[in-house]
Image (cartoon, grey):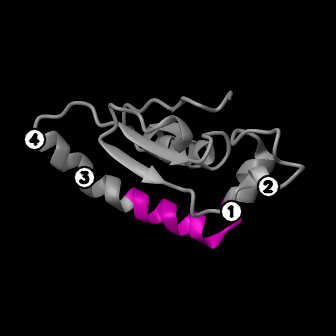
Amino acid sequence: VTSFGFKNGAPRDADIVLDVRFLPNPHWREELRSSTGQSPMVRNYVLSFEDAEIFLEKTKDLIDFLLPRFTSEGKSYVGIAIGCTGGKHRSVVMTEEVGGWLINAGKDAVILHRDMKE
């Protein structure tokens, strides 16, 4: 599961690309701007919105539906990319959440943050 910023383009190897730019942007909150989505303050801010929780529920349902179908088609790897504007806040939070859920479910998942440092 990879977080990224749409300003740098979506990862070319992604099988599933999800857009979280509909969520309020922590960049516009002075106290959150310099932090990343790995900060508890940013995480709490992003997850405080009902739409964030709904997005996570629907994303988990989608992944639960797709993974066995990808497997039955012979895919051994499924790239999931979650993007926001810069790849620093919202996409990082959601990638941590989705990746953590997959790991806790016993999946061989890796969490990457392509654009978080920019």
Tell me where residue 55 appears, x and y as whole percent.
Answer: 50, 64
Asked if the residues shown at circle 2 and circle 3 are in contact, with their CB atoms under 8 angstroms apart, the answer is no
Check disc 3 and report the residue beneath it: 66
Check disc 1 and report the residue beneath it: 24
Check disc 4 and report the residue beneath it: 73
Give amino acid for label 1.
Pro
Distance from Cα at disc 3 to Cα at disc 1 = 28 Å
Side (left or right) of 114 relative to 15: right
Give amino acid for label 3.
Leu
Range of the magenta residues? 47-60
Secondary structure at badge 2 equals: helix
Q: Which residue is found at the position 75% from the left and 53% from the top? A: 26
Distance from Cα at disc 1 to Cα at disc 4 = 37 Å
Query: Which comes before the other along the chain, label 3 or label 4?
Result: 3
Give amino acid for label 4.
Glu
Q: Which residue is found at the position 63% from the left and 50% from the top? A: 90
Give the class, few, some or many, for how many residues have Cα within 10 Å of label 1's Cα (few <14, many ≥20).
Answer: some
Check disc 2 and report the residue beneath it: 28
Q: Nearer the viewer, residue 114 or 110?
A: 114
Q: Which mark is in front, 1 or 4?
A: 1
